[in-house]
Image (tube, rainbow, N blue to C red):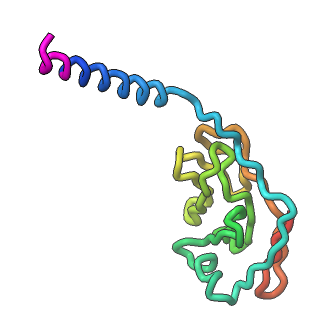
Amino acid sequence: MDRKEFLQLFGMGATALVASACLGGCGSKSSDPAPTPATNVDFTVDLAASSSADLNDDAKGYIYGPNRDVIVAKTTAGAYVAFQAPCPHQGTSVYFNQSQSRFICPNHNAVFTVGGAVVSGPVSQGLKQYTVVQTGTSLRITG
């Protein structure tokens, strides 16, 4: 065997090894555990603050809590709701589509109702809901 044949065989073998490793990973399920919803949640949102502008913007209608573990949304009916922000499937932050009244995970397109229940997607549990109490221009989120 000459050098050229050796390098060709070596290159094809290396390519096959890398390809099999990559393809083997494609079919496997993630071993990452589902994220745990935040506990001991207790924070206040000032609706008049500039940091809350997206919550009151009809084009967006949501903001994240200070640790990004809670999403606060304004429904088309004008009510405020709060849920866990990480999708129960793999932890990607959900966003709120106000016009559809749906929470959506952009990772695998899981969809949740405005009440947090599963509509579709590779998720088996809904979003944990937190209590929202409005006093004037303040929202207190607890849970």
Quadrant, the N terminus: top left
**Residue 48 image point, x, y percent:** 69, 89
Q: Nearer the viewer, residue 44 or 4?
A: 4
**How many numbered marks does the figure carry?**
0
**Residue 76 image point, x, y percent:** 64, 69
Q: Residue furthest top?
A: 1
**Residue 106 image point, x, y percent:** 52, 52
Relative height, residue 29 to residue 141 (above, below): above
Residue range of the region highlighted in magenta in the rendering: 1-7
Which residue lies at the image location 75% right of the left edge and 79% below the top edge?
Answer: 45
Q: Is residue 133 left or right of residue 25?
A: right
Dividing the picture into quarters, in which one does residue 142 lie? bottom right
Q: Main secondary structure of the magenta part?
A: helix
Which residue lies at the image location 59% right of the left edge and 61% below the top edge?
Answer: 95
Relative height, residue 92 to residue 135 (above, below): above
Dividing the picture into quarters, in which one does residue 23 lie? top left
Quadrant, the C terminus: bottom right
Which residue lies at the image location 55% right of the left edge and 71% below the top edge?
Answer: 60
Magenta segment includes 5: yes
Magenta segment includes 130: no
Relative height, residue 94 to residue 122 (above, below): below
Q: Nearer the viewer, residue 88 or 133?
A: 88
Q: Is residue 136 left or right of residue 33?
A: right
Q: Nearer the viewer, residue 65 or 9?
A: 9
Q: Is residue 9 left or right of residue 58?
A: left
Q: Residue furthest front?
A: 2
Which residue lies at the image location 67% right of the left edge and 71% below the top edge?
Answer: 74
Relative height, residue 114 to residue 74 (above, below): above
